[in-house]
Amino acid sequence: MKFKEYLKETEMNEYTKHKLSELISLRAIPLSEPMMKRLGYYWEDTVVYHLTNSKNLPGMTKDQNKKAHISTFSKGGAELARLPSQPDVLLRLKGDEVIQGKSDIWSLTDTQNRRWLDIKTDSKGGETLYNFLNGVLQKVLNQNDLNIELQRGKSFGGDRNLEVELNKLTKKQRSKIYGMYIEEVERFLNSSYKYLNTYLNNLNQFHYNEIILTNWEILDVKSIEIESPLTVKMCAELGLVYSGVIPRKRLSGLVI
């Protein structure tokens, strides 16, 4: 994937909430805290970085110490200086790590603000993991006597036919299928965790890593490149620690 294409997709996915029917059609993996704890991916008291715009600070201050997933990193990369959102502040956070990948893990947000892992089949281990998840989904459909032909999307594993058919079902039917899918995904990962580990450890399209964080708090705030009096004032009003300025070029070398 070219970097311009990556920027376009990142911008679209970061601010879009996806229905469960769409996420299941992607064969995505739900990153729920209880499941990640049981599978051994969850770690408490992780310190990381997050790039954002200063206008988001009031909302983020309110979201502290809640079950809100946020995309963060502990290892920087040159790509962070060219994000489509044009962040002007760097936050240092402390919270609970839900999952981590060696590069961008392509997480998507559902309507309940929970992240899901969208499997990229062009990454090492992605094709195998996707095929297993496809089998999990087929099992769930069979158990519910749903004769829906599964189709592989042209890109990123999408299955528009399945999404349409799921949306035709009653709310009760959909809830049952969604619940069974999540249970079966956990059962599969619990017995075959090596496939997810291989996938996460071999993501290497970009130089930075990605960590999904929950139950987080803001430790301090830095302006990027230029100190804004408005940002300094906002931090004081919100009770946030302001710790100066960081040059944009230094984002690539950040490591915790």
Image: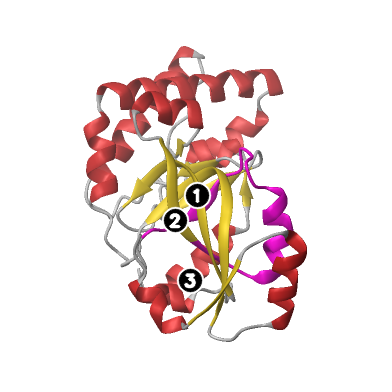
* Quadrant assignment for the C terminus: bottom left
In the rendered image, residue 63, in percent from the top left (x then y), is placed at 68, 47
Q: Are marks 2 and 1 in contact (CB under 8 Å)?
A: yes
Residue 237 in the image: above or below residue 43: below
User: Can residue 184 be seen from the camera position used here?
Assistant: yes
Residue 150 in the image: above or below residue 158: above
Residue 176 in the image: above or below residue 203: above
Asked which quadrant contains residue 236, the reply is bottom right
Q: Secondary structure at mark 3?
A: helix
Residue at label 1?
Answer: 94
Residue at label 2?
Answer: 48
In the image, what residue type sits under mark 2? Answer: Val
**Residue 104 part of the magenta-drawn span:** no
Residue at label 3?
Answer: 7
Q: CA distance from mark 2 to mark 3?
A: 22 Å
Provide the residue span drawn in magenta: 50-74
